[in-house]
Image (cartoon, grey):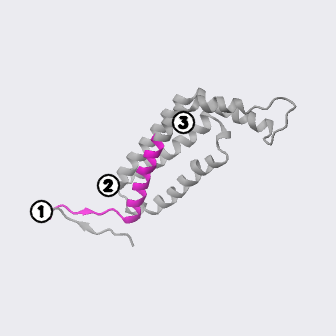
Amino acid sequence: MPDTDTKTDAAGTSPRQQIPSLLNILTILTLVGCSIGILSSFWAYRSAKERYDDALGLQIPEGQFNIYPRKALGRYAEMERRSYENRIAILLVSLTGIAFCAYGAFQMRRLKKRGFYLWMTGESLPILGTLFLVGGGAMGGVSIFLLLLIPAIFFFLYSSQRIYLVN
């Protein structure tokens, strides 16, 4: 059972409910994830041209054999081109989502229910922005794990803590 004892200040007049343990851990992990997200967003912005050039370098000359299918390499190059062309929009969408996540986590630490909805909006923005700006090809391989699985796990864990959140 989560620790929800009330604490009072030095005068003993204003009781304050303590944050449940799981909610505390989740919000700390969210803030750590926001910090990592800020760094990775700026890294993606800065390295977009290099990744696009690398993708173009992977193109196979006609008649030459390679283990990678030519069509898959073409899709990868197209995805990197879109990422490069939309790098500013992707950066802004990512930073906006991170801001919503962080603010939502701080609100949930104050046991405010709206923090859950702000956090959920912040988690959805980069996913929808990536799909809209880059295309569905960005949702493959390891990125599907990072973009969908981790937020889904956090969604279910945060949902279990909503009983402690108030208006």
Residue 119 place in picture, x, y as percent: 44, 48
Q: Kindly check if marks 3 and 2 are in contact, taking CB atoms under 8 A apart as contact.
A: no
- Horizontally, residue 108 falls left or right of residue 51, namely left
Residue 164 place in picture, x, y as percent: 37, 62
Name the disc covering residue 110, or none.
2
Q: Of label 3 and label 1, which has the lower sequence position?
A: 1
Amino acid type, callout 3: Ala
Q: Kindly check if marks 1 and 2 are in contact, taking CB atoms under 8 A apart as contact.
A: no
For disc 3, the marked residue is 44
Q: Quadrant of the C terminus?
A: bottom left
Q: Where is 115 relative to 81, above or below?
A: below
Q: Of label 1 and label 2, which has the lower sequence position?
A: 1
Residue farthest along the right direction in this orientation: 63
Magenta-highlighted residues? 12-38
Asked if residue 35 is among those painted magenta in the image, a careful observer would answer: yes
Q: Secondary structure at mark 2?
A: loop
Residue farthest along the left direction in this orientation: 11
Q: Secondary structure at mark 3?
A: helix
Q: Where is 116 relative to 15, above or below?
A: above
State the residue in front, 167 or 53.
53
For disc 1, the marked residue is 11
Majority secondary structure of magenta residues: helix
State the residue in front, 123 or 114.
123
Q: Secondary structure at mark 1?
A: loop
